[in-house]
Amino acid sequence: MTKDLFARHRSVLPDWLALYYDDPLEITHGEGRHVWDADGRRYLDFFGGILTTMTAHALPEVTKAVSEQAGRVLHSSTLYLNRPMVELAERIAQLSGVPDARVFFTTSGTEANDTALLLATTYRRSNTVLAMRNSYHGRSFGAVGITGNRSWSPTSLSPLQTLYVHGGVRTRGPYASFSDAEFIAACVADLKDLLGHTRPPAALIAEPIQGVGGFTSPPDGLYAAFREVLAERGILWIADEVQTGWGRTGEHFWGWQAHARSGPPDLVTFAKGIGNGASIGGVIARAEIMNCLDSNSISTFGGTQITMAAGLANLTYLLEHDLQGNARRVGGLLMERLRALAAQIPAVREVRGRGLMLGIELTRPGTDQADPEAASAVLEAARDGGLLIGKGGGHDTSVLRIAPPLSLTVAEAEEGAAILEDALRSVG
């Protein structure tokens, strides 16, 4: 049955729509931190639909909220007052750390980043944008134009003039050998030099931890140092929290809070985990920025009642059960386990990340050369062992991405680590 579905998929969907595994997997249902395939096999899910199943599969509180809302009204658009949308916006504005915050809902992280770019370029009257090397911000025409990752950039055409800044990757590039303080100083000097050679940019957009780029990040405080330089020139800071938001990093509710010395971002984008699978994205911005558009705008599906009900129930569960604290505790144990394992396997160059957002970079033993073939082999071996993980990376896809639901238990973390150990040892 799966092979038939695969053949049908290939006959009607684009060739560039990637599928994991040599024998693609159909997931039919899930519960907690587990999913089942069409053959009835159970897997421990360490990728959560690309960091989207944030709390748990089939979470009863979310299922109940969606069912009850579906029995009333699914959708009405932003042309009408929408109580669930207002209530979720109020919660997010309060949690955001952005002063005088306004919230606009979209249907995806891509659309959220596009909206943030529209706001920033309109507010600043500039189409020049600063972005980070190795970054990824979505698959739309505008978002591709600020993506610093060749594997996810199908065109060089863009409505924006994008300039790429150093700093998103700590352990590679020209400053990799520097201390953290030297690294930050060098990146700030590079930023200042870049700004001396261009017209004033609208904004810097940056992921606190780069997601598709392989869960890479700078030293804490880099974006705070950048913000000091940017603020002197009126340049906005957009924090792309599509993957890092809602407590996934454990130490902070938002990834930008590791860089908070110079204050919060001007705009924050979010998506993925807030809906636990429902299509929710959005932008948080200071009122003066959010309200800068001088023409009409609506969203047909952004903020629709059914997704807002899911988001409210999911966020409430996350906060009431301290899943940020669980990500910190269980993620810390998982990190220790993986680093101890990595010390025994020459193919593992680095284990990095925070909370339940961890990356394992694979290279050819004895070198810094990325090994995407090994990453693919580990992905397959982990599946054979009953574990689903993701892949990512910059120039080559050689990083294993681990991002389970934030309700992961210690026993499940140990189980997943044991499967990963067997998978990693199987390729060297």
Image (cartoon, helix red, strand yellow):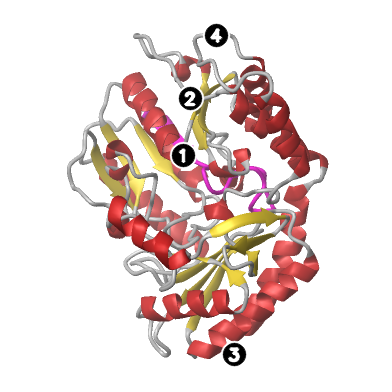
The residue nearer to you, when weighing 264 against 344, is 344
Which numbered disc flags the more N-terminal residue, 3 or 2? 2
Q: Secondary structure at mark 3?
A: loop
Among the two numbered marks 1 and 4 on one chain, the one whose residue lies closer to the N terminus:
4
Q: Residue furthest left?
A: 157
The circle on residue 344 is: 3
Relative height, residue 83 to residue 310 (above, below): above
Mark linked to residue 80: 4
Question: Is residue 86 found left or right of 135 in the rendered image?
Answer: right
| Distance from Cα at disc 3 to Cα at disc 2 | 50 Å
Mark 1 — residue? 109
Residue shown at 45%/36% (left/top)? Answer: 238
Are the residues tagged 1 and 2 within 8 Å (C-beta)? no
Which amino acid is tagged 2? Phe
Which circle's residue, 1 or 2, is located before the other in the chain?
Answer: 1
Disc ID at residue 254: none
Residue 248 lies, in percent from the top left, at: 64, 51
Mark 2 vs 4: CB contact within 8 A: no
Q: Amino acid at mark 4?
A: Tyr
Image coordinates for residue 313, horizontal then vertical, percent: 73, 34
Spatial CA distance of label 1 from label 4 is: 24 Å
Which of the two marks, 3 or 2, is nearer to us in this view? 2
Range of residues picked out in magenta:
231-254
Q: Is residue 296 above or below residue 230?
A: above
- Asked if one can make out residue 235 in the rendered structure from this viewpoint, the answer is no
User: Mark 2 highlights which residue?
Assistant: 301
Ranked by sequence position, the earlier of labels 4 and 3 is: 4
Q: Quadrant of residue 10?
A: bottom left
Which residue corresponds to the image point at 71% horizontal and 38% vertical from the top-left? 63
Can residue 48 be found in the magenta stretch? no
Which badge, 3 or 1, is on the more N-terminal residue?
A: 1
Alpha carbon separation for disc pair 1 and 2: 14 Å
